[in-house]
Amino acid sequence: MDKLGYVIEEAGLTILRQKGTALLRLSFGMLYSLSFILLARGWVTLLQLESNEKENPLKNSNPINALLENNTDQTLISFLGILKFAFLIICLAMLVFVAFYLFSFLQKQFLLEKDELQIKAYLGSSALKITGEFFAPIAIILAFGGICGIICGNYLYLQFYKRAVWWVKEVLHSSTHYLVIVDIPFVLLMTVLLGLQFLYMKQKITALN
């Protein structure tokens, strides 16, 4: 616990020394998570809309009107399918982007601080402790920004839901539902990504000895 407290304290001091950079990273984390969860929620909503349209039976008994209605429904379903695919591609592209960004950014930081990290290793600090001191400031800022983005996303969604007309509300899920199927999986995915990056950096720092 003492080591963990020391790492967090050092991370806090590092953040304070680099306020400008920390603010930019915080803004990036916030905007990224806000954009992703809104797009992911949009994708889930489009899935629901498409499902509703496919299950919606034709109510018009007139054959000509039924044919016209069927053509209109098929056009709408096709349009929803295109939108759904576009939202999915954007979400996947954002996940690939953040993985590449973290990898390249940490590589750059490692090269910049390599001499300092090597000195710490020679002085007897464990690879785990050195990695924690190196990784914690970045992880804390991005995590805090991500949480702020999720909170903002939920607030914006609630405001939209309150002001939406009744037929829009019929196809929207509750905020709790989106929290379970979008927000929590996103947090878990980002945690896994940061964990993998941490293990990778630990391996590189261990090789300095």
Image (cartoon, helix red, strand yellow):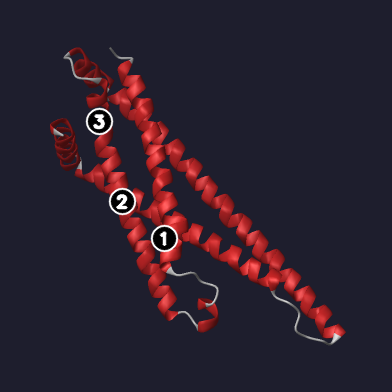
Q: Position of residue 155 (x, y in %)?
A: 35, 68
Q: Position of residue 116 (x, y in %)?
A: 22, 21
Looking at the rendered structure, the secondary structure element under dot 1 is helix
Q: Which residue is mark 1?
A: 179
Asked if labels 3 and 1 touch by Cβ distance under 8 angstroms, the answer is: no
Looking at the rendered structure, the secondary structure element under dot 3 is helix
Q: Position of residue 201 (x, y in %)?
A: 35, 26
Query: Residue 40 versus residue 180: which sits nearer the camera?
Result: 180
Q: Is residue 109 left or right of residue 62?
A: left
Sequence order check, earlier mark of 2 and 1: 2
Amino acid under disc 1: Leu
Residue 190, compared with residue 196, is above or below; it is below
Amino acid under disc 2: Gly
| Image disc number at residue 99 | none
Residue 206, compared with residue 45, is above or below; it is above
Label count reads 3
Amino acid under disc 3: Gly
Task: Compute the Cα span from label 3 to label 2.
Answer: 19 Å
Say few, some or many: other residues with alpha carbon within 10 Å of mark 3 (under 14 / 14 to 19 / 20 or more): many
Q: Which residue is mark 3?
A: 132
**Residue at the (50%, 41%) spot, across then down:** 96
Q: Which residue is mark 2?
A: 145
| For discs 1 and 3, the disc positioned in front in the rendered view | 1
Looking at the rendered structure, the secondary structure element under dot 2 is helix
Task: Compute the Cα span from label 2 to label 1.
Answer: 17 Å
Sequence order check, earlier mark of 3 and 2: 3
Q: Is residue 102 left or right of residue 64?
A: left
